[in-house]
Amino acid sequence: MTRLTLAIDAMGGDFGPCVTVPAALQALASHSQLQLLLIGDPAAITPLLAKADSAVKGRLQVIPAESVIASDARPSQAIRHSRGSSMRIALELVKEGKAQACVSAGNTGALMGLAKLLLKPLDGIERPALTTVLPHQQRGNTLVLDLGANVESDSAMLVQFAIMGAVMAEEVLAIERPRVALLNIGQEETKGLNSIREAAEQLRASPQINYIGYLEGNDLLTGKTDVLVCDGFVGNVTLKTLEGVVRMFLSLLKSSGEGKKRAWWMKLLERWIKKRLAKRFGHLNPDQYNGACLLGLRGTVIKSHGAANQRAFAAAIEQAEQAVRRQVPERIAARLKAVLARSD
């Protein structure tokens, strides 16, 4: 296994270095061939490295940054004033070949804009899309995009998302002829926005895409499709609603029955049921699949949730490592070129 280097925006997200630095140390401890570049304020980062193992610290470098892009900053304004920021420096390191991927929990719009500006989209892609892999009840995975990179998407963009998602599912998830569906308010062909109906018409006419039609939100975790396509507004709301419900469910498993007097056999039965449920649904914990890949770029960029904890941010770093090792951009570019050529 060859050594690889990732650039980490240590200042991004709701908690900054308090989360990103411990997560980085966790990732380094788990992967001996991993090197990390932590970009941010050395005064905030260095104290958090004091107790780290010397062998781990030897594969970590702190790169100073002058500023941080605020999470609530307007993307256009943030991009104009991004020079010297931790996010921009992390992306520049990827552009210069000093790192193979960038991980940031910072401002999504700014990350999208800067990544497109610095790394450039692949040929045939108008705008990159945020995508993640969600586990479903059949113990498989569904790839969902877009999750917020593009609030509005026309039919051409939705078709591009479908192609990228299908290619990623086939090349990376090893799903032969992956099923592709459009997220809609109903399964009837007459329902939905014009952009969705027009995209559906184009996908039905494309023999290179295994298009299966519309799916509603309640089918997200059923395993009925391998790739689910939507615009960024709908995708972001859908994902965050799902994560909120899953977190509430898992928290109820931990807290139900606390403080109540019960017979010993009822407590034993309740503990057994909670353990079974946690084992059955624990894989849906959002912390385990945090990190959305900006698909469609010439480099690898992973967007972590802004509110990610240490475990979740470490999962985003893990996803970046896997994307680099599996050569996601290169595989997407090669397959995308072939698919678009056959579509001409």
Image: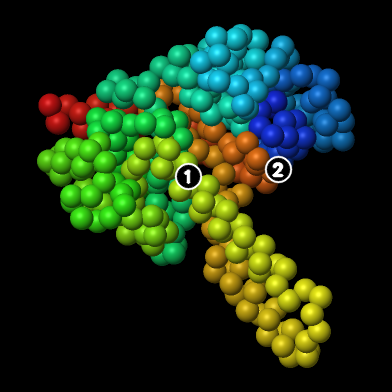
150 to 309, vertically: above or below = above
* Nearer mark to the viewer, of 1 and 2: 1
**Residue 295, relative to residue 207: is it above or below?**
above
Q: Are marks 1 and 2 in contact (CB under 8 Å)?
A: no
Q: Quadrant of the C terminus?
A: top left
Residue 321 x %, y %: 55, 35
Q: Image quadrant of residue 220?
A: bottom left
* Closest to the observer, 307 or 179: 307
Q: Kindly identify the amino acid type of the residue bearing the numbered disc 2.
A: Gln
For the point 51% across and 54% down, which residue is it?
Answer: 242
Q: Residue at point 65% right, 73% down? A: 275
In the rendered image, which residue does mark 2 sit on?
A: 310
* 199 or 9: nearer the viewer: 199
Which three-letter amino acid code belongs to the residue tagged 1? Val
Question: Taking the image as drawn, is residue 253 in sight?
Answer: yes
Residue 39 on image: x %, y %:
69, 20
Determine the residue positioned at 81% across, 75% down: 259
Question: What separation in Å lies between label 1 and label 2 (alpha carbons)?
Answer: 23 Å
- Viewer-proximal residue among 210 and 105: 105
Task: Give the percent coordinates (x, y) of residue 56.
Answer: 76, 33
Residue marked by disc 1: 237
The local secondary structure at tag 2 comes to helix
* Relative horizontal placement of residue 58, taking residue 27 as reference (left or right): right
Q: Is residue 160 at all visible to an observer of this figure?
A: no
> Secondary structure under badge 1?
helix
Q: Where does the image place residue 330, in percent across and percent down from the top left?
A: 37, 27
The quadrant holding residue 62 is top right
Q: In which quarter of the image is the N terminus?
A: top right
Disc 2: CA contacts within 10 A as few (<14), some (14-19) or many (>=20): some
User: Which badge, 1 or 2, is on the more N-terminal residue?
Assistant: 1
Q: Please count the marks in the image.
A: 2
> Which residue shows up at 45% across the image and 48% down it?
238
